[in-house]
Amino acid sequence: MTEPRATVRGGGHGAVLAAVRTLLADGKAYSAEELCARGIDHKLLAPSTIPNYVRNAIKTLLDRQRDRAEKPEFVLLRDGRYRLDMPLDAFAGHDDPEPANPRIEALIARLEASAHRRTPPEPGDGPNIGAPFERDVAAAFTALGFTAKRMGGQGEPDVVATAPLGDRAYTVVVECKTAATADDQVRNPVAQEAGRLRDLVGGDYAVLLGPDFPHAAEIDAELQTHHVALWTCDDLVKLLHAHAVHAIRWSRLLPLFTPGRASDAIAEFTHLHVHSDRKRAHVAYRYVLEEGLAYQELLANADPQIQRPTAPLTVEALAVLVNERLARDAELGRVSLDDIRAAVTYGAHPLVDTISLDGDRVTIEARWVEQRRTTPSSESEEP
């Protein structure tokens, strides 16, 4: 199973909630005792943390979200366990390897520091204390595959990022806000300025980005009036982590630039990006190799004095084998014939070459090998 990243620092409810988000990211449900033990084991929580403190941190957050009429971040199940308030992961028991990407983790650490003004400005930054954050935000959009540049001059946008989609290209103008207050909130979230700068450079979308923002009706109204999306740094981090699992298509990000607060949409988008169609395809391909090869080995290891039965693998036979495996593993999900056909087509591609196909006959030609990958865009770019 992929190990949670030991990146949570500090104390208080904020640190506990950050650990809980990390631990629940696999789509499974855990009790407060399990979250506490796992958090301490993975160095996400202080050794002195007790389950009641985890419960109180979650309850405080859910009460605050209820009072603000926000979507709850976690669900408390009848048996006392917690899970993310996201669509159920039909293949939650499937261990899907999550790539280790030190460059992305280093970039996220820099974003955390510069967003809170802990990164000193460079000599040429003048009075712009937010310049380090602007550079890190530009690097984050570059890591997502955008052509991004930091401008940041007087009367200029902070960051301009373009999705290189040819005649479908779009440009996002990002207004970056830092915070150095105890409540972590930006004091001057001016959506009007973000909208004005987008229009100034002919951009398509505007994003106001910072550590956190006050919950106020005036801010929400201004976001709608000036057609500006509000992102937090946590939202950007979620996208970076999801992109590290497999690249996010730029065209799929468009709904996240809808005017208003984007946190709920980004949380659901990144969850589905990792745990929905891509995971189904991964499960189907992996189990086609494993169960198909096990079937072939059963025939190959038959008594040599007895003629091997003629029972070739087909897409239909593989669907039965894979779904029987899923049932044995107590998974909620099942795969269709189309899922199996797609997995066989993928494996038969010359760049993959793990499966051969002769008419309706499928032959598994390789064992499943777990691989850990890095994000292609971050390999070619220095965040």
Image: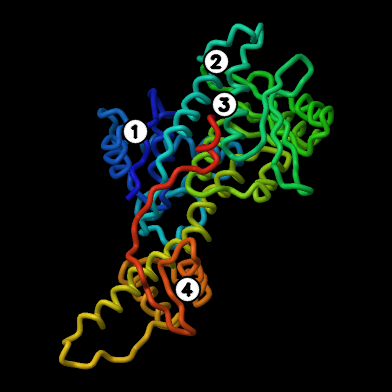
Is 257 above or below relative to 246? Answer: above
Marks 2/4: CA distance?
A: 51 Å
Can see residue 284? yes
Q: Is residue 354 left or right of residue 254?
A: left
The CA span between labels 3 and 2 is: 11 Å
- Residue 216 location in percent, x, y? 68, 29
Q: Is residue 351 above or below residue 253?
A: below
Q: Position of residue 113 (x, y in %)?
A: 50, 20
Quarter residue 105 falls in: top left
Q: Are marks 2 and 1 in contact (CB under 8 Å)?
A: no
The mark that comes first in sequence, 1 or 3, is 1
Residue at the disc numbered 1: 44
Q: Are marks 1 and 3 in contact (CB under 8 Å)?
A: no
Answer whether labels 4 and 1 touch (C-beta < 8 Å): no
Write down the residue under mark 3: 211
Q: Nearer the viewer, residue 261 or 382?
A: 382
Of mark 4 and mark 3, the one earlier in the sequence is 3
Q: Which mark is residue 340?
A: 4
Q: Residue at x 37, y 69 (%)?
A: 289
Which residue: 66% across, 11% down? 128
Pointers 3 and 2 in contact (CB under 8 A)?
A: no
C-alpha separation, residue under disc 4 versus residue under disc 3? 43 Å
Badge 4, how many Cα within 10 Å: few under 14, some, many 20+? many
Identified by mark 3, the residue type is: Pro
